[in-house]
Image (spheres, rainbow, N blue to C red):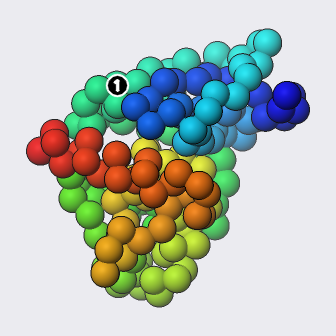
């Protein structure tokens, strides 16, 4: 069994597995999962509103996200995550395009994507390589299939 530290505040079923929500004193985190993790005995009540938004997105990617405060991030990461939120649903940008928009480099953008605590809200799945899909979830097994599903979900809703 997983440790208590792995327990979630909310777990949302998704076509690719699950989306987990963890709440911390200073913020929140979303996690894509292929398998369910246990829920906390006393989940943080803030998780419910976030879980409702995730469930709404899975039904309609055009839903309007309510602000979710990031719990961490350097000024550069916050700038990249903001730029991600400006990409319309159903569209993508390359790492290079986002790098130009944030006056940085493609590898720095990729690192900010990997550090993103709030995927979906900061839609890092919309960032692709110039020659294909690029990476996702820092190479975790099944991550690219989740990225493909998210992009197809948004394309179908255009």
Which residue: 31% across, 81% down? Answer: 131
Which residue: 40% across, 24% down? Answer: 55
Q: Is residue 118 left or right of residue 106?
A: right
Which residue: 16% across, 39% down? Answer: 157
7 is higher (above) or lower (below) than 131: above
> Would you name the residue on which mark 1 appears?
56
Q: Is residue 116 visible?
A: no
22 is higher (above) or lower (below) than 103: above
Q: Is residue 115 left or right of residue 13?
A: right
Q: Residues within 10 Å of mark 1 (few under 14, many from 20)?
A: some
Q: Is residue 64 left or right of residue 78?
A: left
Task: Tell how many labels.
Answer: 1
Quadrant where the C terminus sits is top left
Q: Is residue 19 visible?
A: yes
Looking at the rendering, which quadrant does residue 128 occupy? bottom left
Which residue: 63% across, 38% down? Answer: 28
């Amino acid at each position: 069994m997983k440790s208590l530290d792995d327990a979630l505040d909310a777990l949302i079923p998704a076509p690719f597995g699950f989306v987990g929500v963890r709440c911390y004193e200073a913020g929140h985190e979303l996690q894509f999962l292929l398998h369910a993790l246990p829920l906390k005995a006393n989940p943080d009540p803030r998780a419910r509103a976030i879980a409702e938004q995730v469930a709404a997105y899975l039904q309609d990617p055009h839903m309007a996200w309510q602000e979710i405060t990031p719990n961490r991030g350097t000024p550069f990461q916050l700038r990249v995550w903001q730029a991600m939120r400006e990409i319309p649903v159903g569209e993508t940008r390359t790492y290079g395009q986002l790098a130009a928009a944030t006056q940085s480099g493609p590898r720095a953008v990729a690192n900010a994507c990997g550090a993103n605590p709030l995927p979906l809200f900061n839609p890092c799945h919309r960032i692709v390589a110039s020659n294909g899909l690029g990476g996702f979830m820092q190479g975790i097994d099944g991550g690219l299939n989740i990225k493909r599903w998210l992009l197809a979900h948004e394309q179908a809703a255009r």
